[in-house]
Amino acid sequence: MKRFFINSNNYHKLIIISFCILFLLPFKIFIFWSLLIAFVVSLFKKNKVLVKDALTNSIDIVVSPVTGTIKAIEIEKDHVKYLIASPAFGNFGLYFPFSSTIDRFETQGGKNVHRVGRSNKISQNVDKIELSFVNRTGSRVGINIYRSLISGKPHIWPKVGDKGRVSSNFGFLPFGGLVEVIIPGESNQLVSNGEKVLSGSTPLAGFKGNNDER
């Protein structure tokens, strides 16, 4: 996988090099570029992902793949959908919802969605990326990534067949958007509508019947 986010070592090196170059510029330009660099780096610096050891080793807990707010929860007979609105500023990263393998990756062109609109329904003709993750017990999680009016194009690095542990970074969604997490079968809901979630950390749901298969 490619690495987009700035780790702590490269972050400190970038700051030192930038300031060494900026000292050669006039004072006003120095201040302007200092503020600009600080703003850009703050946007794309990787946030710390806090995952407890119990979640790291679990195969039946699904965590949020993105930071944002639960916009809607739809409970159907054979699945549950969690619609998460990712803010325009913050952690843009996308993370594995559980330790799994990507077995589906499809894209669809169309119109952008309204991230803050009142309606929670998403039409068929929208710009989205569809991903499917499956773990070693056969449990599956689907993720649909929708572009909003001001968000950039989602960047997804892995290919079908690539594996990742829970909270592993697999891409980013510039300036946020809508992310839909689809959990088939029976599961225990662990969040409520309107709740704020952290990428790779906040549990969304737990699969039923996998406790004895670890």
Image (spheres, rainbow, N blue to C red):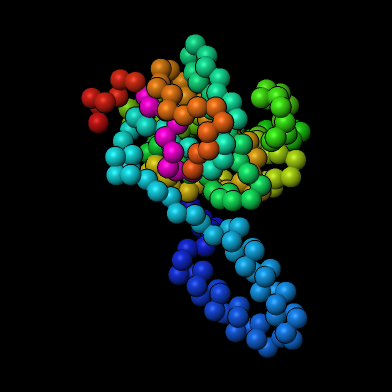
Choose top left, top right, bottom left or bottom right for residue 201: top left
Q: Which residues are magenta?
A: 199-207
Q: Is residue 21 above or below residue 127?
A: below
* 101 over 158 or under it: above or below: above
Residue 159 seen: no
Judging depth in this view, the residue of 84 and 69 nearest the camera is 69
Q: Is residue 202 magenta?
A: yes
Q: Which quarter of the picture shows residue 145?
A: top right
At 69% across and 47% down in the image, what residue appears? 152
Image location of residue 69, percent across then percent down: 57, 36
Image point (50%, 46%), residue name: 170
Question: Which residue extends farthest top?
Answer: 77
Q: Position of residue 50 (x, y in %)?
A: 40, 48
- Quarter of the picture holding the C terminus: top left
Residue at the spot 56% in from the left edge and 50% down from the top edge: 91
Q: Is residue 148 left or right of residue 15?
A: right
Position of 195 with respect to 52 (left or right) is: right
**Badge count:** 0
* Residue 125 visible in the picture: yes
Q: Residue at x 47, y 24 (%)?
A: 183
The picture places residue 162, in percent across and down from the top left corner, at 44, 42
Whether residue 86 appears in magenta in the rendering, the answer is no
Whole-percent x, y for residue 191 in the image: 47, 29
> Does residue 28 sit above or below 68 in this rendering?
below
